């Protein structure tokens, strides 16, 4: 436990470390992977392929 007089140093991230992997996604170059959990859409009654971006965790659906 730190005493009252101790100074705690915080790690400051460089901009390259802070945005690592997100610059490609912001420009539309996602790294899509198939999400195996959801394969059937109950509302539409169709088979659906759900893609998840490996870098930014965004979802995209494709109806077959």
Image (cartoon, rainbow, N blue to C red):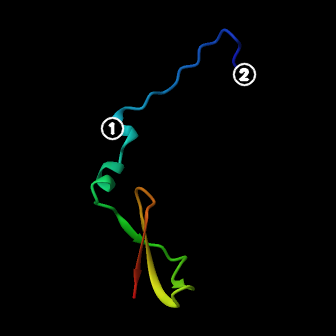
The residue under the point 36% across, 45% down is 20
Please, what secondary structure does the residue beneath circle 1 have?
helix
The residue under the point 53% across, 78% down is 38
- Examine the image and state in which quarter residue 31 appears: bottom left
Extreme residue toward the top, this view:
5
Q: Which residue is mark 1?
A: 16
9 horizontally vs 23: left or right: right
Does residue 21 appear in the picture of this structure?
no
Q: Nearer the viewer, mark 2 or mark 1?
A: 1
Query: Which badge, 2 or 1, comes first in the chain's sequence?
Result: 2
The C terminus, quarter of image: bottom left
Q: How many marks?
A: 2
Q: Which residue is mark 2?
A: 1
Bin the neighbour count of mark 1 within 10 Å (Cα to Cα): few under 14, some 14-19, many 20 and up: few
Note whether 25 is above or below 12 in the view shown: below
Note whether 60 is above or below 12 in the view shown: below
Extreme residue toward the front, this view:
43
Between residue 60 and residue 37, name the one nearer to us: 60
Q: Position of residue 59 (x, y in %)?
A: 44, 67
């Amino acid at each position: 436990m730190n005493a009252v007089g101790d100074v705690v140093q915080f790690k400051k991230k460089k901009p390259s470390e802070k945005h690592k992997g997100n610059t490609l996604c912001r420009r539309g170059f996602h790294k899509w992977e198939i999400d195996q959990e959801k394969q059937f859409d109950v509302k539409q009654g169709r088979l659906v392929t759900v893609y998840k971006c490996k870098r930014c965790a965004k979802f995209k659906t494709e109806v077959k």
